[in-house]
């Protein structure tokens, strides 16, 4: 067995958990129950993520999440609607709700969320993107790039405007891209961008995880789950907003009959174990990518402490414990 104890995990991208979709009409009580289930996997803080949608839908989802008052909430992650409308780059986001970026729209959504949008993901090339990046960053919001078909110059301009992260690098793009240049290489080579990675074997294969972390440097990599309601639940049919998806026994979540992935059923202890296994990095290094580093990216302290026991190779999670009070300072 392998065991590690340290600051509780911080998940910057979670769309749902334990049978509850944060992008659907569910009760705040149901959301609170899902947060408790997430804590049981060692997560002390998270950014509930609301994907591309109308203003009204975003407003209602945000208010239901925030009404729980749960201490796990570190803010909200607004992923879209300022993303590429192109198939492949758009991923599972609804085309009908994709719009150009505008500060008027962002302010409306931020006001509706009581100022709790802490992370905004957009595409660097959409009209209005640079203005929104500059405006959001000026108010303390972190801005990330994804679901984007930006050129090298457009990515550089977005970074100059204040973008500081690549959301789920290596995903949110078609299965086939130009060999080079492309949005993955350009973001991987940009030292100013942190990279969040979904380490589940479906979004990124082991060799890709190893190379990306080696190229970017473990200190600039963050592990996220991009979990939907299938995480912490049995395989079966689920939803992400209006989209019907299937979680198969391997943990892959996708639109039925399609290659399009739609979130994951990953948990943070699984991500940490696989990251350590596939990179041969010390478990403490992988743990930091899922705890202190995402907290540092947000400018927040971690909340609580977790301990995880894995099988000898780190591929299987055997036991997890979470305490909202830290017993030690380091991981």
Image (cartoon, rainbow, N blue to C red):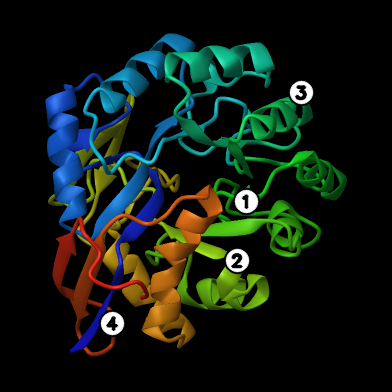
Query: Residue 41 location in percent, x, y?
Result: 20, 59
For disc 1, the neighbor class at 10 Å (few under 14, some 14 to 19, many from 20) is many
Nearer the observer, disc 2 or disc 4? Answer: 2
User: From the viewer's perspective, is 1 left or right of 93?
Assistant: left
Asked if disc 4 and disc 1 are in contact, CB closer than 8 Å, the reply is no
Tell me the residue that label 1 is attached to: 165
Which mark is first along the chain, 4 or 2? 2
Tell me the residue that label 2 is attached to: 220
For disc 4, the neighbor class at 10 Å (few under 14, some 14 to 19, many from 20) is many
Tell me the residue that label 3 is attached to: 127
Nearer the observer, disc 4 or disc 1? Answer: 1
Q: Looking at this view, is 122 or 322 the one in front?
A: 322
Asked if disc 3 and disc 4 are in contact, CB closer than 8 Å, the reply is no
Nearer the observer, disc 1 or disc 3? Answer: 1
**Residue 164, relative to residue 41: is it above or below?**
above
Asked if disc 2 and disc 4 are in contact, CB closer than 8 Å, the reply is no
Which mark is first along the chain, 3 or 2? 3
For disc 3, the neighbor class at 10 Å (few under 14, some 14 to 19, many from 20) is some
SS of the residue at dot 2? Answer: helix
Mark sitting on residue 314: 4
User: Residue at image x 79%, y 38%?
Assistant: 161
Asked if disc 1 and disc 2 are in contact, CB closer than 8 Å, the reply is no
Q: Looking at this view, is 46 or 145 the one in front?
A: 46
Which mark is first along the chain, 4 or 3? 3
Query: Residue 290 location in percent, x, y?
Result: 41, 64
Residue at the outermost right position: 153
User: From the viewer's perspective, is 187 left or right of 251?
Assistant: right
SS of the residue at dot 3? Answer: loop
């Amino acid at each position: 067995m392998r065991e590690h104890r340290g600051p509780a995990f911080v998940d910057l991208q979670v769309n749902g958990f334990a049978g509850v979709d944060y992008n659907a009409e569910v009760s705040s009580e149901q959301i609170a129950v899902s947060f408790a289930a997430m804590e049981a996997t060692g997560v002390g803080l998270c950014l509930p993520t609301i994907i591309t949608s109308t203003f009204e839908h975003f407003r209602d989802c945000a208010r239901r999440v925030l009404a729980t008052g749960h201490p796990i909430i570190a803010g909200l992650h607004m992923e879209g609607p300022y993303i590429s409308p192109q198939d492949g780059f758009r991923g599972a986001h609804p085309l009908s709700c994709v719009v150009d970026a505008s500060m008027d729209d962002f302010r409306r959504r931020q006001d509706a969320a009581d100022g709790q949008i802490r992370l905004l993901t957009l595409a660097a090339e959409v009209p209005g993107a640079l203005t929104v990046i500059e405006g959001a960053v000026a108010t303390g919001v972190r801005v990330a790039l994804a679901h984007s078909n930006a050129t090298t110059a457009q990515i550089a301009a977005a970074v100059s405007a204040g973008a500081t992260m690549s959301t789920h690098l290596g995903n949110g793009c078609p299965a086939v891209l130009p060999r080079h240049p492309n949005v993955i290489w350009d973001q991987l080579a940009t030292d100013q961008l942190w990279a969040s990675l979904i380490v589940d074997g479906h979004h990124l294969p082991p060799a890709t995880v190893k190379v990306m972390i080696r190229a970017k440097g473990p200190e600039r990599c963050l592990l996220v789950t991009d979990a939907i309601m299938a995480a912490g639940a049995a395989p079966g049919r689920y939803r992400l907003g209006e989209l019907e998806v299937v979680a198969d026994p391997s943990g892959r979540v996708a639109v039925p009959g399609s290659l399009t992935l739609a979130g994951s059923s990953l948990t943070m202890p699984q991500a940490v174990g696989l990251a350590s296994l596939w990179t041969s990095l010390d478990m403490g290094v992988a743990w930091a990518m899922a705890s202190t580093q995402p907290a540092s990216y947000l400018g927040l302290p971690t909340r609580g402490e977790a301990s995880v026991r894995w099988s000898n190779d780190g591929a299987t999670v055997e036991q997890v414990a979470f305490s909202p009070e830290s017993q030690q300072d380091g991981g």
